[in-house]
Image (cartoon, rainbow, N blue to C red):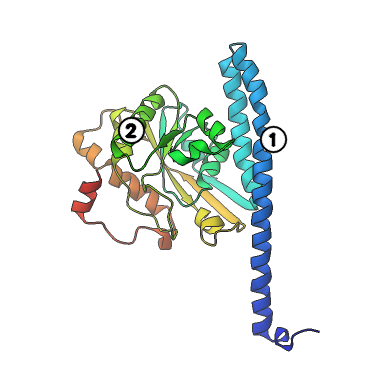
Amino acid sequence: MKNPGDRTPAGRLSKGVKNNKINSMVRSLLFGFFFWLYTMFISLAIIPIGLCLLFRRPQAADRIFSKLVGAWGRTVFIMAGIKVEVRGKEKLPPHDRICFVSNHQSYGDIPLILGYLGKKTGFIAKRELSRVPILSFWMKQLQCIFINRGHGNQSIRLIAEGMKKISQGRPLVIFPEGHRSKDGVMRHFKSGGIHLAANEDITIVPLTIDGMFHAYEEKKRITPGTAIITVHDPIETTGLSPENRRALTKQIQNIICEALPEQYRIKAEKPAEQIRGEE
Protein backbone atom coordinates (compact mmCIF):
# COMPACT_ATOMS: atom_id res chain seq x y z
CA MET A 1 0.00 0.00 0.00
CA LYS A 2 1.32 3.43 -0.94
CA ASN A 3 1.87 6.04 1.72
CA PRO A 4 -0.66 8.89 1.20
CA GLY A 5 2.16 11.33 1.90
CA ASP A 6 3.93 10.17 -1.27
CA ARG A 7 1.15 11.78 -3.36
CA THR A 8 1.93 15.30 -2.14
CA PRO A 9 4.60 17.46 -3.86
CA ALA A 10 6.71 17.39 -0.69
CA GLY A 11 6.41 13.61 -0.51
CA ARG A 12 7.40 13.14 -4.15
CA LEU A 13 10.34 15.51 -3.69
CA SER A 14 11.52 13.65 -0.59
CA LYS A 15 11.22 10.33 -2.40
CA GLY A 16 13.11 11.71 -5.41
CA VAL A 17 15.95 12.99 -3.23
CA LYS A 18 16.16 9.62 -1.49
CA ASN A 19 16.27 7.76 -4.81
CA ASN A 20 18.97 10.10 -6.15
CA LYS A 21 21.04 9.50 -3.03
CA ILE A 22 20.70 5.72 -3.38
CA ASN A 23 21.58 5.90 -7.10
CA SER A 24 24.63 8.01 -6.30
CA MET A 25 25.79 5.57 -3.62
CA VAL A 26 25.35 2.61 -5.98
CA ARG A 27 27.27 4.48 -8.69
CA SER A 28 30.08 5.19 -6.21
CA LEU A 29 30.29 1.52 -5.17
CA LEU A 30 30.31 0.32 -8.77
CA PHE A 31 32.89 2.95 -9.67
CA GLY A 32 35.17 1.83 -6.83
CA PHE A 33 34.91 -1.82 -7.91
CA PHE A 34 35.58 -1.18 -11.59
CA PHE A 35 38.28 1.41 -10.81
CA TRP A 36 40.43 -1.12 -8.98
CA LEU A 37 39.55 -3.89 -11.44
CA TYR A 38 40.64 -1.73 -14.38
CA THR A 39 43.75 -0.52 -12.53
CA MET A 40 44.79 -4.13 -11.87
CA PHE A 41 44.09 -5.05 -15.49
CA ILE A 42 46.32 -2.35 -16.97
CA SER A 43 48.97 -3.24 -14.40
CA LEU A 44 49.54 -6.35 -16.54
CA ALA A 45 51.38 -3.90 -18.79
CA ILE A 46 54.35 -4.41 -16.50
CA ILE A 47 55.09 -7.45 -18.70
CA PRO A 48 55.68 -5.61 -22.04
CA ILE A 49 57.29 -2.70 -20.20
CA GLY A 50 59.63 -5.11 -18.43
CA LEU A 51 60.52 -6.77 -21.74
CA CYS A 52 61.33 -3.40 -23.29
CA LEU A 53 63.62 -2.58 -20.39
CA LEU A 54 65.18 -6.04 -20.52
CA PHE A 55 66.12 -5.51 -24.17
CA ARG A 56 67.34 -1.99 -23.40
CA ARG A 57 64.57 -0.09 -25.10
CA PRO A 58 63.62 2.44 -22.42
CA GLN A 59 62.01 4.84 -24.91
CA ALA A 60 59.59 2.13 -26.07
CA ALA A 61 58.77 1.31 -22.44
CA ASP A 62 58.17 4.99 -21.76
CA ARG A 63 55.79 5.31 -24.73
CA ILE A 64 53.76 2.29 -23.62
CA PHE A 65 53.57 3.58 -20.07
CA SER A 66 52.54 7.10 -21.16
CA LYS A 67 49.69 5.77 -23.32
CA LEU A 68 48.43 3.48 -20.56
CA VAL A 69 48.49 6.20 -17.92
CA GLY A 70 46.58 8.59 -20.20
CA ALA A 71 44.00 5.90 -21.01
CA TRP A 72 43.64 5.12 -17.30
CA GLY A 73 42.95 8.77 -16.46
CA ARG A 74 40.31 9.16 -19.19
CA THR A 75 38.62 5.85 -18.29
CA VAL A 76 38.23 7.00 -14.68
CA PHE A 77 36.06 9.91 -15.85
CA ILE A 78 34.08 7.84 -18.33
CA MET A 79 33.22 5.34 -15.59
CA ALA A 80 32.26 8.16 -13.21
CA GLY A 81 29.97 9.81 -15.79
CA ILE A 82 31.93 13.07 -15.60
CA LYS A 83 32.44 15.09 -18.77
CA VAL A 84 35.78 16.86 -19.14
CA GLU A 85 36.45 20.17 -20.84
CA VAL A 86 40.06 21.25 -21.48
CA ARG A 87 40.66 24.92 -22.15
CA GLY A 88 43.92 26.37 -23.46
CA LYS A 89 45.65 23.05 -24.18
CA GLU A 90 47.37 24.70 -27.15
CA LYS A 91 49.35 26.78 -24.63
CA LEU A 92 51.29 23.75 -23.39
CA PRO A 93 55.02 24.09 -24.17
CA PRO A 94 56.43 21.56 -26.68
CA HIS A 95 59.13 20.51 -24.19
CA ASP A 96 58.80 18.64 -20.88
CA ARG A 97 60.80 20.93 -18.57
CA ILE A 98 57.53 21.94 -16.92
CA CYS A 99 56.32 22.48 -13.38
CA PHE A 100 52.52 22.51 -13.37
CA VAL A 101 51.02 24.57 -10.52
CA SER A 102 47.36 23.89 -9.75
CA ASN A 103 44.61 24.43 -7.22
CA HIS A 104 43.50 21.20 -5.52
CA GLN A 105 39.79 20.31 -5.34
CA SER A 106 39.71 16.51 -5.22
CA TYR A 107 41.51 13.17 -5.43
CA GLY A 108 40.28 13.20 -9.02
CA ASP A 109 42.59 16.10 -9.93
CA ILE A 110 45.42 13.64 -10.57
CA PRO A 111 43.69 11.35 -13.13
CA LEU A 112 42.24 14.52 -14.69
CA ILE A 113 45.72 15.92 -15.37
CA LEU A 114 47.16 12.55 -16.43
CA GLY A 115 44.28 11.75 -18.76
CA TYR A 116 43.69 15.04 -20.51
CA LEU A 117 46.92 17.07 -20.76
CA GLY A 118 48.91 14.50 -22.74
CA LYS A 119 51.95 14.78 -20.46
CA LYS A 120 53.39 12.00 -18.31
CA THR A 121 53.87 13.92 -15.12
CA GLY A 122 54.75 13.13 -11.53
CA PHE A 123 53.15 14.49 -8.38
CA ILE A 124 54.09 15.36 -4.84
CA ALA A 125 52.20 12.88 -2.67
CA LYS A 126 52.00 11.96 0.99
CA ARG A 127 54.27 9.10 2.00
CA GLU A 128 51.39 6.80 2.96
CA LEU A 129 50.46 6.35 -0.72
CA SER A 130 53.81 4.68 -1.36
CA ARG A 131 52.48 1.69 0.60
CA VAL A 132 49.27 1.21 -1.41
CA PRO A 133 49.58 -1.90 -3.64
CA ILE A 134 49.35 -1.37 -7.41
CA LEU A 135 48.80 2.39 -7.05
CA SER A 136 52.29 2.85 -5.61
CA PHE A 137 53.81 0.97 -8.58
CA TRP A 138 52.28 3.40 -11.07
CA MET A 139 53.18 6.43 -8.96
CA LYS A 140 56.80 5.36 -8.76
CA GLN A 141 56.91 4.92 -12.53
CA LEU A 142 55.64 8.49 -12.83
CA GLN A 143 58.57 9.66 -10.67
CA CYS A 144 56.21 10.89 -7.95
CA ILE A 145 57.78 12.38 -4.84
CA PHE A 146 56.62 10.91 -1.53
CA ILE A 147 56.96 13.28 1.40
CA ASN A 148 56.30 13.14 5.12
CA ARG A 149 54.43 16.31 5.97
CA GLY A 150 55.70 16.10 9.54
CA HIS A 151 59.32 16.50 8.41
CA GLY A 152 59.55 19.89 6.73
CA ASN A 153 63.28 19.99 5.98
CA GLN A 154 63.28 16.50 4.48
CA SER A 155 60.23 17.35 2.35
CA ILE A 156 61.90 20.49 0.99
CA ARG A 157 65.00 18.47 0.07
CA LEU A 158 62.91 15.86 -1.77
CA ILE A 159 60.91 18.51 -3.64
CA ALA A 160 64.17 20.25 -4.63
CA GLU A 161 65.40 16.93 -6.07
CA GLY A 162 62.15 16.64 -8.01
CA MET A 163 62.67 20.11 -9.48
CA LYS A 164 66.10 19.04 -10.73
CA LYS A 165 64.45 16.08 -12.49
CA ILE A 166 62.21 18.55 -14.33
CA SER A 167 65.34 20.00 -15.93
CA GLN A 168 65.96 16.48 -17.26
CA GLY A 169 62.53 16.38 -18.93
CA ARG A 170 60.39 14.93 -16.11
CA PRO A 171 57.33 17.21 -15.58
CA LEU A 172 56.00 17.63 -12.07
CA VAL A 173 52.70 18.90 -10.63
CA ILE A 174 52.55 20.78 -7.34
CA PHE A 175 49.48 21.84 -5.35
CA PRO A 176 50.65 24.88 -3.33
CA GLU A 177 47.53 24.90 -1.15
CA GLY A 178 49.10 21.90 0.57
CA HIS A 179 45.90 19.80 0.70
CA ARG A 180 42.53 19.37 -0.95
CA SER A 181 39.93 22.07 -0.40
CA LYS A 182 37.34 21.04 2.19
CA ASP A 183 34.62 23.31 0.81
CA GLY A 184 35.67 23.94 -2.78
CA VAL A 185 37.09 27.37 -1.95
CA MET A 186 40.69 27.92 -3.04
CA ARG A 187 43.21 28.61 -0.27
CA HIS A 188 46.29 30.83 -0.24
CA PHE A 189 49.37 29.31 -1.85
CA LYS A 190 52.54 28.43 0.01
CA SER A 191 55.67 29.66 -1.71
CA GLY A 192 58.17 26.84 -1.13
CA GLY A 193 57.60 24.68 -4.23
CA ILE A 194 57.18 27.64 -6.57
CA HIS A 195 60.44 29.24 -5.36
CA LEU A 196 62.28 25.94 -5.83
CA ALA A 197 60.92 25.71 -9.40
CA ALA A 198 62.04 29.27 -10.16
CA ASN A 199 65.53 28.48 -8.83
CA GLU A 200 65.87 25.77 -11.50
CA ASP A 201 64.92 28.20 -14.33
CA ILE A 202 62.18 25.90 -15.61
CA THR A 203 58.82 26.71 -17.20
CA ILE A 204 55.86 27.07 -14.84
CA VAL A 205 52.39 26.36 -16.26
CA PRO A 206 49.45 27.42 -14.03
CA LEU A 207 46.36 25.19 -14.13
CA THR A 208 42.85 25.91 -12.85
CA ILE A 209 40.67 22.92 -11.97
CA ASP A 210 36.95 23.47 -11.53
CA GLY A 211 34.07 21.04 -11.00
CA MET A 212 36.02 18.31 -9.19
CA PHE A 213 34.82 19.38 -5.75
CA HIS A 214 31.21 18.83 -6.87
CA ALA A 215 32.15 15.55 -8.58
CA TYR A 216 33.15 13.85 -5.33
CA GLU A 217 34.33 15.88 -2.34
CA GLU A 218 31.08 17.79 -1.81
CA LYS A 219 29.02 14.67 -0.96
CA LYS A 220 31.81 12.08 -0.62
CA ARG A 221 30.32 10.06 -3.43
CA ILE A 222 30.48 10.14 -7.22
CA THR A 223 28.28 12.87 -8.72
CA PRO A 224 28.10 13.12 -12.53
CA GLY A 225 28.79 16.57 -13.92
CA THR A 226 31.47 18.48 -15.80
CA ALA A 227 35.10 19.01 -14.84
CA ILE A 228 37.02 21.88 -16.43
CA ILE A 229 40.79 22.16 -16.56
CA THR A 230 42.21 25.45 -17.81
CA VAL A 231 45.80 25.75 -19.04
CA HIS A 232 47.15 29.27 -18.59
CA ASP A 233 50.03 31.00 -20.36
CA PRO A 234 53.42 29.50 -19.43
CA ILE A 235 55.70 31.56 -17.19
CA GLU A 236 59.41 31.43 -17.97
CA THR A 237 61.50 31.77 -14.82
CA THR A 238 64.87 32.20 -16.52
CA GLY A 239 66.22 35.70 -15.94
CA LEU A 240 63.55 36.75 -13.45
CA SER A 241 64.66 39.56 -11.17
CA PRO A 242 64.72 38.91 -7.39
CA GLU A 243 61.69 41.18 -7.04
CA ASN A 244 59.71 39.25 -9.67
CA ARG A 245 60.68 35.94 -8.07
CA ARG A 246 59.31 37.12 -4.74
CA ALA A 247 56.05 38.14 -6.42
CA LEU A 248 55.75 34.90 -8.39
CA THR A 249 53.59 32.96 -5.90
CA LYS A 250 51.02 35.75 -5.68
CA GLN A 251 51.05 36.18 -9.46
CA ILE A 252 50.35 32.48 -10.09
CA GLN A 253 47.76 32.34 -7.30
CA ASN A 254 45.82 35.23 -8.87
CA ILE A 255 45.96 33.71 -12.37
CA ILE A 256 44.53 30.39 -11.14
CA CYS A 257 41.97 31.98 -8.82
CA GLU A 258 40.50 34.33 -11.43
CA ALA A 259 39.48 31.39 -13.64
CA LEU A 260 37.29 29.92 -10.87
CA PRO A 261 33.61 30.76 -10.30
CA GLU A 262 33.19 33.55 -7.75
CA GLN A 263 32.03 31.23 -4.94
CA TYR A 264 35.24 29.19 -5.11
CA ARG A 265 37.72 32.06 -5.14
CA ILE A 266 39.87 33.04 -2.17
CA LYS A 267 37.62 34.90 0.24
CA ALA A 268 39.94 37.19 2.18
CA GLU A 269 43.51 38.38 2.05
CA LYS A 270 45.86 36.65 4.47
CA PRO A 271 47.93 38.94 6.74
CA ALA A 272 51.41 39.63 5.33
CA GLU A 273 53.17 38.34 8.42
CA GLN A 274 51.36 34.98 8.11
CA ILE A 275 52.41 34.64 4.46
CA ARG A 276 56.03 35.38 5.38
CA GLY A 277 55.86 32.73 8.10
CA GLU A 278 54.98 30.05 5.51
CA GLU A 279 57.77 30.92 3.08
Q: Position of residue 172 (x, y in %)?
A: 43, 33
Q: Nearer the viewer, residue 191 or 198?
A: 191
Callout 2 environment at 10 Å: few (<14), some (14 to 19), or many (20+)?
many
**In the drawing, does residue 85 fall left or right of residue 81?**
left
Q: Would you say residue 258 is visible in this rendering?
A: yes
Q: Is residue 74 above or below residue 44?
A: below
**SS label for mark 2:** helix
Viewer-nearest of discs 2 and 1: 1
Q: Amino acid at mark 2?
A: Ala
Which quadrant of the figure has residue 61?
top right
- Relative to 106, residue 183 above or below: below
Q: Which residue is mark 2?
A: 197
Front residue of this view, candidates 22 and 149 = 149
Relative to 176, 36 lies left or right: right
Please report the residue visible at 58 percent of the width from the left and 29 percent of the height from the top. Answer: 66
Spot occupied by residue 135 in the image (x, y as percentages of width and height): 56, 37
Using the image, tell me which numbered label, if any, was put on residue 276: none
Helix, strand or loop at mark 1: helix
Image quarter of the C terminus: top left
Residue kind at label 1, given as amino acid type: Phe
| Residue located beneath label 1 in the image | 41
Find residue 108 and report its horizontal and vertical position in percent. 54, 48
For residue 134, side relative to residue 155 (left or right): right
Judge by depth and name the residue closer to the eye, 87 or 279: 279
Q: Residue at x 54, y 44 (%)?
A: 112
* Of pointers 2 and 1, the one earlier in the residue sequence: 1
At 56% across and 16% down in the image, what residue appears?
A: 58
Real-space CA distance between mark 2 and mark 1, rounded to the nearest whole angstrom? 36 Å
- Are the residues at dot 2 and dot 1 in contact (C-beta closer than 8 Å)? no
Task: State the residue lying farthest toward the bottom.
Answer: 4
Indicate the quadrant containing the N terminus: top left, top right, bottom left or bottom right: bottom right
* Residue 126 can be seen in this image: no
